[in-house]
Image (cartoon, grey):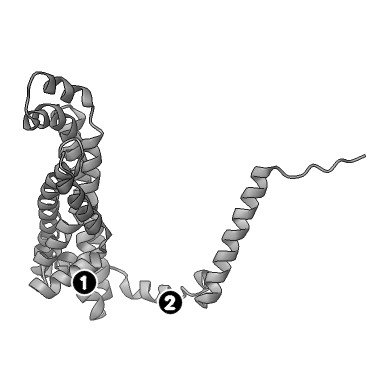
Amino acid sequence: MKYYIPPSRRYRQKAALFSLLALVLAGLCLYLDFNPLMLFTEFHYLGDLLKSMTPPDFNLVWRSKDIPMAVAETVSMAFLGTLFGGVLAIVLAFLAASNTMPFRVVRIPVRLLLVLLRAIPALIVILVFVVSVGLGAFAGMLTLVIGTIGTFGQLFMEVIENTESAPAEAIYSVGASRWQVIRYAILPQAVPSFIANLFYSFDVNIRASIGLGIFGGGGIGFRLFLAMRVLHYRDALALVCLTIILIVLMERLSDALRGRLIGRGTLK
């Protein structure tokens, strides 16, 4: 005699969740008139595009004086955006952290500002700055400053609030002021994390500066956009390869500097 064993409650919950997800995906595909098979059948034109792009014309790097300048613009945008944005993010983080700013009238508006800056898409910011200050690296750098403040201001605030309270209480107990507590109890704990995240921010901004260049932010991204627009596909592939090399080199440099400053205990 066989006994029927009903499925467990956890199995029924997973099955119901999977069914609901499948229904939502099917509904979205019907609403958007999207055929999922297009993901596998609509890329036949890529072969023709790749044929027109290969081999990459690396002579562009040597015959055009604009390319080295574009690379310098891209690195400068990322560096200055990280530097200015990181400094402002640290200042705002101290104003937003509960253990360094006791006044809610200051702390809450700063937190709202960080949320607002983090919520605005970078493409909207670059369009605003392009209209305000014109095309070029300056608009891209300002966009990276805003993005760095929004992304890392909240992170730095959490780093400050998660520092150990025992050193601060010990310094408070001997009559130290709030500034002395920040200097001798909070900063030594927070600085290594600040430095590590700023190097990570530089890696992110290198990639972002190339994307922003396509929308008028200058640098090598703008040269890539121009090459694609005039159908110089071999030049475009050479610029893509140059972009990959640039990103890898900057990432290696960032990792090496971070290892020297933090991994070996230089900032303790």
Image position, residue 179 (x, y; %)? 7, 32
Q: Give the residue number, with chain letter if any, for mark 1.
A: 215
Whole-Å distance between the Cαs marked 1 and 2?
Answer: 25 Å
Q: Nearer the viewer, residue 97 or 31?
A: 97
Dot 1: within a 10 Å radius of its alpha carbon, few (fewer than 14), some, or many (20 or more) residues?
some
Place residue 268 in its image quadrant. top left
Is the residue marked by circle 2 packed among few (<14), some (14-19), or many (20+) residues within 10 Å?
few
- Residue 61 pos. (x, y %): 15, 65
Q: Earlier in the sequence, mark 1 or mark 2?
A: 2
Give the answer, above or below, for where 268 lies relative to 40: above
Tell me the amino acid under the disc marked 2.
Tyr
- Looking at the rendered structure, the kind of residue marked 1 is Phe
Q: Position of residue 117 (x, y in %)?
A: 22, 58
Kind of element beneath mark 1: helix
Residue visible at 19% across and 72% down? 127
Residue at numbered disc 2:
45
The residue closer to the viewer here, 159 or 237, is: 159
> Does the image show residue 205?
no
The N terminus sits in image quarter: top right
Q: Which quadrant of the structure image shows residue 139?
A: bottom left
Vertical side of 113 occupied by 266: above or below: above
Instruction: Identify the residue at the far bottom of this view.
Output: 230
Nearest-to-viewer mark from 1 and 2:
1
- Residue at x 11% of width, y 49% of height: 88
Rendered residue at 18%/52% (across/down)? 109
Q: Is residue 66 above or below residue 1?
A: below
Q: Is residue 80 visible?
A: yes
Q: Secondary structure at mark 2?
A: helix
